[in-house]
Amino acid sequence: MTEFTQIGKILSGKYVGRDVSVRGWIYRKRSSGGVQFLVLRDSTGTMQVAIKKENVPEKAYHDADKALIESAVTAKGVVKEDKRAPGGYELQVTKFSVISFSEPFPITEHQSTELLLDLRHLWLRSQKLTNIMKVRQYLVNYLREYFFSQGFWEVAPPIITQAGCEGGSTLFEFKYFDDTAYLSQSAQLYNEVFITALEKIFVLAPSFRAERSRTVKHLAEYWHLEAEEAFYHNEDNMKLQEELVSYACQKLAKNHADLLEFFKVKPETLAKVSPPFKRMRYEDAIDFLVKKEVKKKWGDDFGAEDEEILTTGLEKPMFIYNYPKEGRAFYMKVNPENPKTVLNADMQAPNGHGELVGGSERIWEYDELMKRIKEEKLDVKSYQWYVDLRKYGSVPHSGFGLGIERLLKWVLNLDHIRDAVPFPRTINRVYP
Ligand code: NSS
């Protein structure tokens, strides 16, 4: 059987003079004076292969001539250094065959965003999206690595649930046999179950939000990295988050400068992301905005423009903490120093990229939680198991959720969150 060499390895320069076989897809092509110059792409890179009429059988040359962009091919030949070739190396081909001929590829230069989204199944092979998927994998890997290094266990909560976590307005409801259920908005309530056994846990799973908003930061389906920690208070929770995010940023900066540069992101910028992150009380954030002549009063939410004003020019993310109790989720612990507020924190990305993390200390006492569930008029039946946890050895605890696509959007400075995920689901798109 033929052994194939990855293009990335050839580009490292160690294969000059060697006879190798490669396989991949035609990325670009041109011909001149009896030579077909193809640029081949595989998962590791692109390189030029030169097919000279006199060096290959007639059929091979004819096929190379006929094959359109995105045809799948194999080529064998000797690697030569060639400064004119993109990447600096060229394969001088002696054997060439087409695995499958492509029809005319429907994506050419300067296509509309809508068309590229309709053709997402084909556009995913573009260099931009391929590189995003690579960075995404590294990022997720480093986040996981950090949790494991701190003694966290990875758990598997359900996706189908009857206990909404983040309010009824963004729940996806569906028929569940003869009953009704929802797609999970957050694994949090289940995460709180695991801590009495494993103490510190995390989960990476899809979360679903029936978001009516058309923004560059909202998806209907996103990947949610959530953690829950027994005996942690809000400040411990924030420390954990800033260390987690810093660890991943620094590892990316150290190990993947080439990928970052593709997105014009300077590795030095990410290397600077280190604890502590700036912390600002909610009320101080309101004052800050008022001083910038934004019409804001205590109790208001922050919109995209407010977030931009608060975070423009920052080198690393910041926390806004102790939000008003009114409008916050039912499970958040009230701040004993100011009972109009809760012990929560949101981590905001620099330069208006939006909220990366939402976290809080949880109500761990039975009576207090029951009172909040009733105040919020939630269906006690669906939450009975959750409240039950407060009867059997409950402890103070905290946790948070980080949107993977939000983090990727900020790290790579992407214009739109949809490019941080292969198949974006938004209010007006569920195809392909
Ligand atoms: O609603 S959150 O702020 N918080 C929770 O869901 C908690 N129950 C998490 C927890 O404590 N275990 O969402 C958390 C993060 C938020 O900061 C964003 O980064 C991300 O989830 N998020 C989203 N990403 C993309 N699209 C949408 N619609 C979205 N909503 C939240």
Image: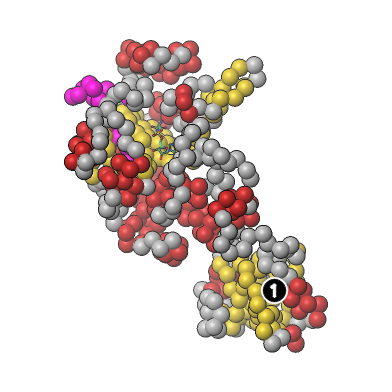
Q: Main secondary structure of the magenta part?
A: loop
**What residue did someone put label 1 on?**
75
Looking at this view, is 90 or 288 the one in front?
A: 288
Which quarter holds ligand 1? top left
Residue at left offset 55%, top offset 70%: 9
Query: In what element is the residue under mark 1?
Result: strand
Q: Is residue 92 visible?
A: yes
Q: Could you say which quadrant of the image residue 8 lies in? A: bottom right
Q: Quadrant for residue 17, please give it.
A: bottom right
Position of 190 relative to 425 (above/below): above
Q: Is residue 268 above or below residue 403?
A: below
Residue 181 falls in image quadrant: top right
Q: In this view, does 432 lie to the left or right of 389?
A: right
Label 1 beta carbon within 8 A of ligand 1: no
Question: Can residue 242 be spotted in the picture?
Answer: no
Q: Residue at x 54, y 58 (%)?
A: 130
| Front-lying residue, 405 or 118 | 118
> Does the magenta segment cover residue 334?
yes
| In the displayed structure image, the side of residue 90 where residue 405 appears, left or right | left
Q: Where is residue 401 in the image (x, y as percent from the top left)?
A: 40, 36
Q: How is the image coloured?
A: secondary structure
Residue 337 in the image: state x and y as whole percent. 18, 24
The range drawn in magenta is 332-347
- Quadrant including the C terminus: top right
317 horizontally vs 100: left or right: left
Numbered-mark total: 1
Image point (21%, 33%), residue name: 283
Where is residue 388? Give x, y as percent: 42, 15
